[in-house]
Amino acid sequence: MTRPGLRARAQRLPVVTRLVLAVAVTMSLVLTGAAGLVYWRVQTALDQQLDDDLATYQHTLDRAVRAGAALPPGPSGSLHQVLDARGRILDADPAVRGRPLLTAAERGAAARGHTVRRDVGSLLPITADTLRVQAARVTAGGHVRLVVAAVRRGHRDEALRELLAQLAFASGLTLIAASYVGYRTARAALRPVERYRRGAAKLADGGQDLRLDVPADRDDEITRLGHTLNRMLDRLAASAAREHQFIADASHELRTPLTLMRAELDVALHRPRTAGELTDTLRSVDTEVRRLVTLANTLLDLEQLDSGERIQRSPVALDRLLDDASAPYRAAAGRDGRTLTVSCDDATVRVDPHWLHPALGTLLDNALRHGAGAIALRATVRDGRLSLSVADAGSGFPGDFLPHAFERFTRAETSRTTPGTGLGLALVAAVAASHDGTARAENTSPGAVVTLDITC
């Protein structure tokens, strides 16, 4: 229960605080390991020197006891005791004459021939008269003697305590410095993120500048995040613009047919009408309703394409695609005394026929309504691209209309007296763009041609 609670509380801390804590914990482990290694190496060196001195002194004492000679003096700070087999002190330095340096168990082990070594006193907490003691059995004149050599550990312990203090002080300063550097580094690294957050907050509060200030001369994780956020904001802005455009287009284009329908109904209800007059009114209303349905469907198709919805490509025989798209218009061309020819390469293409059929239908319908002469639907495949074109032999597009041919609700002056919404070529351009292609319109001699160049 405790560990998840601590983890949850830690996750609620600010990112900078968590980074500083991570740096502090990591540096604490590193400094503790480094300090432990240094302390161990120094302690080992000091203990080795102390043990060498003690072993040398012990050897000197053992030789003197065996020879029955006077005990020689040892190194500075050394002490000695000579015990009999029952532990009575036979000879000793004045400082330890009345204090046995071995316990009963240690005396027994030494009497059995074992070398006994132990420390008297502790490094921490500080105790007085700390010793390192070594005892061995010696036979002198047929009697067993226990020779105890000891050296003072004061200088060694003082050096280790000073080392511990210096290591603690240096580690503390290093930890503080590392934490400060980690804090400054984290703040500097997250400063752009905070700037992006403030920019996003302004946008959320209704700001108009839908861009974040991202440095152009850098390429790190933060700047890449900024560029990604800007791309997201661009898409949001484009989505909002499409939504506003859709609402504006719909309200603009729906107003006229709705007004006409309201006027027809008002006139029909103003006074009693004959059955023929009511029939004419209903037919007029039906025409406007059909126009509204066509307009709404086209607007929805455009919105679906502009929203970036992925098309569903599938392999389709090119001749079948063109035959299916042109079949509904062959009879209309025949009634007008015109010809509709279809020519294409023998190929299979990967396209979305669900969208290409209405696009080609729009071009053929425009050629029938606004063009003249023969209509030609052609398709060629080159280097992974499909070129679809519809040409007629009419008068062509007005010169001032060509630059705006694929804009929504744009109609040439000569076609304003014929039914239409001005969305057909806009739909064609959207279908081409959804296939990673383009649409273009141009005048020929005679007539005009509209071409879709798409990937397949």
Image (tube, rainbow, N blue to C red):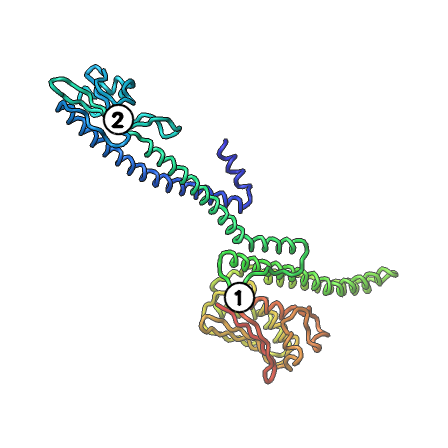
Say which residue appears at 67% left-offset and 58% top-offset.
Answer: 207
- Relative to residue 446, is residue 242 depicted above or below? above
Residues tagged 1 and 2 counted as in contact (Cβ below 8 A): no
**Residue depicted at 36% across the width and 30% down the height:** 123
Q: Nearer the viewer, residue 302 or 65?
A: 65
Closer to the camera in the image, 302 or 420 = 302
Residue at 52% over, 40% down: 10
Q: Amino acid at mark 2?
A: Leu
Q: Is residue 79 visible?
A: yes
In screen coordinates, is 111 left or right of 363? left
Amino acid type of the residue tagged 1 in the rendering: His
Which label is found at residue 79? 2
Q: Secondary structure at mark 1?
A: loop
Q: Identify the residue at horizontal 68%, vertical 56% (top origin).
A: 206
Q: Which mark is residue 435?
A: 1
Considering only vertical position in the picture, is 302 above or below 447?
A: above
Q: Quadrant of residue 338?
A: bottom right
Query: Camera-side residue: 429 or 242?
Result: 242
In space, the residues marked 1 and 2 are separated at their CA atoms by 99 Å
Query: Which tag, 1 or 2, sits closer to the chain's start?
Result: 2
**Res 93 quadrant in image:** top left
Residue farthest to the left, as pictured: 142
Q: Is residue 422 above or below residue 270?
A: below
Kindly give the residue lying farthest to the bottom in the view shown. 445
**Residue 452, x across and y down, in percent:** 55, 72
Is residue 308 in view from this perspective?
A: no
Mark 2 neighbour density, 10 Å: few (under 14) some (14–19) many (20 or more)? many
Q: Position of residue 184 (x, y in %)?
A: 52, 50
> On the rendered structure, is 35 left or right of 282?
left
